[in-house]
Amino acid sequence: MKPRPSGEIKALALLNGRLAGSYRTTLNLSTGGPTAVLIEDGRIARLGDDGTIRGLVGRRGRAIDVEGAVIAPGIVDAHMHAFDCALALRRVSCLPPAVDSLTGLKQRLADRAGSLPAGAWVVATGYDDTRLREKRHPSRLDVDAAVPHHPAVVGRVCGHMSVANTLALASAGIDAATPDPPGGTIVRDPAGAPTGLLLETAQDLVWRVTPPLSGPDIRHALSQIGRQILGYGITTICEALLGAFHPLEVDIWSELLSGQWDGPRVRFLAQPDTVEPALAARLPVVGTKLFADGVITGRTAALWQPFEGTADLGMLIHEPRELTDMVRRSTVRGLLVGIHAMGDRGIAVALDAIERAGGPAGPEQAAGQRAGRHRIEHCTLPAPESLRKIRQLGVVPVLQPSFLFAEGEAYLARLGHRRCERTYPLRAMIDQGLRPALSSDAPCTSWDDPINPWLGIATSVARETWAGSVLGTSEMVSAGEAMFCYTANGARALGLENELGAIATGKDADLIVLPRDPFTGEDPVRLAALRPTAVIVKGKVVHGAFA
Ligand SMILES: [Zn+2]
């Protein structure tokens, strides 16, 4: 154990609170229960009435009167990309609602190019074709028109496709003769020339020749993101694709987490070839991140029935047998898998891979049993059979309700109303005994406040898009149920259910103080704007009042 710096308070008491207790599948305010929490050595040592807890803390520590505020468990964002959020801080942002037309997008690119010497890269992210007035992707020629003298790449908000201009394609060596890489598509015009749009792994051809940001620059931005995350009341995150964003990613994380990190707790899902280096660097890796399919909005998710108005069934990233082998390789190492799967066919393929990799019995399986619960990331449109299989296999679905808000209109165009009503089926999952975790997937969301968990909670309640369409009233849940998924179920998705996710004696003291009761009939718009007045991680006030 590290020696405690002098002056650090050993005990902390929160008095005069309304505690959010766990009731089966929901969080709710207890009536007539404890009103105070005693925290010792970073853990919840005792719950009780104000007088008792005040007496116990005595002169050993500090007692804070929260004046009737709500005390809830800290939020666990079970799938986000803090590192990519940090990179996004340094790139041109094309996120809606700020950028809502190709003209606006081109202007942003041209502005950035104007501040750079000719030949320097212009790197942008966050465009959403469905939110642009022109309702199409930019082309190589669009980007050329804005940025003729600089190589430029613009990532779509989903992270699954990018548009490169002529100079960027040339830098990457992509021309009409370049074959599609495995798992990717270089979109071409009728004459066979690349249009600039690159799907899935094809975009890596360009991204890998963009100049990497410097280590110190990223460290600074990542620390900034860590503090932002705490400000929303998120006390633990799962960084869901370690190794995909920068050559120094593992080094930067390990340096930050072993030193002065004042952000949330962090766990990792690593991409397959980053697992070993990340474990060697002693990063807390819980699993391997794999991909079954693409995304709904980009029509690359794998479906059983075609996307609306097309014959297109989307795409699988791997042959099913290959995916099964990848799951097996992860469980042999004692690691779970988090498989990205959005379409009903993609989800079925992912579950098959998990099921097949589970047997036959042997040394592999014995090792595999050390792995935690496998996860399906997004799990956007599960078929009823898949819900049954998720339960049977003990898989954790990790959902992003804020996608319904930010991208629900695009989902309507891609899937039609009936299928949209079944997306992110939180009510069905809870009723069938599943334990879904919630998350933001920031920055991969078509909204310029992507980390905000309260938007996800509000959308779980209202299922309303940014434009006001309501998608599937039968899948609505209460704010308390959504909070339970965002706390207890999130902790469980990371194998941290014994330490985190509830206010109970013996658990780590990761708590948030809320200025009002979010559980009873809060208007969704107000709910999305809720922020904690104080955030406590490991018993230490890290944000807001009392810090
Ligand atoms: Zn993600």
Image (cartoon, grey):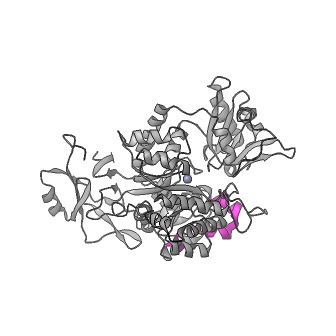
- Where residue 339 appears, as percent x and y from the top left, is 56, 60
Identify the residue at image location x=35%, y=39%.
259
> What range is drawn magenta here?
408-429
Tell me if residue 271 comes above or below residue 456 in the rendering: above
- Where residue 36 appears, as percent x and y from the top left, is 23, 61
Q: Is residue 252 left or right of residue 507?
A: right
- Where residue 72 appears, as percent x and y from the top left, is 34, 60
Q: Observer-nearest residue: 35 or 276?
A: 276
Q: Is residue 101 magenta?
A: no
Q: Observer-nearest residue: 372 or 332?
A: 332
Residue situated furthest front in the rendering? 363
Tell me if residue 213 comes above or below residue 469 in the rendering: above
Q: Is residue 37 left or right of residue 79?
A: left
User: Does residue 466 appear in this view?
Assistant: yes
> Exactly how many numbered labels are in the figure?
0
Tell me if residue 51 comes above or below residue 153 in the rendering: below
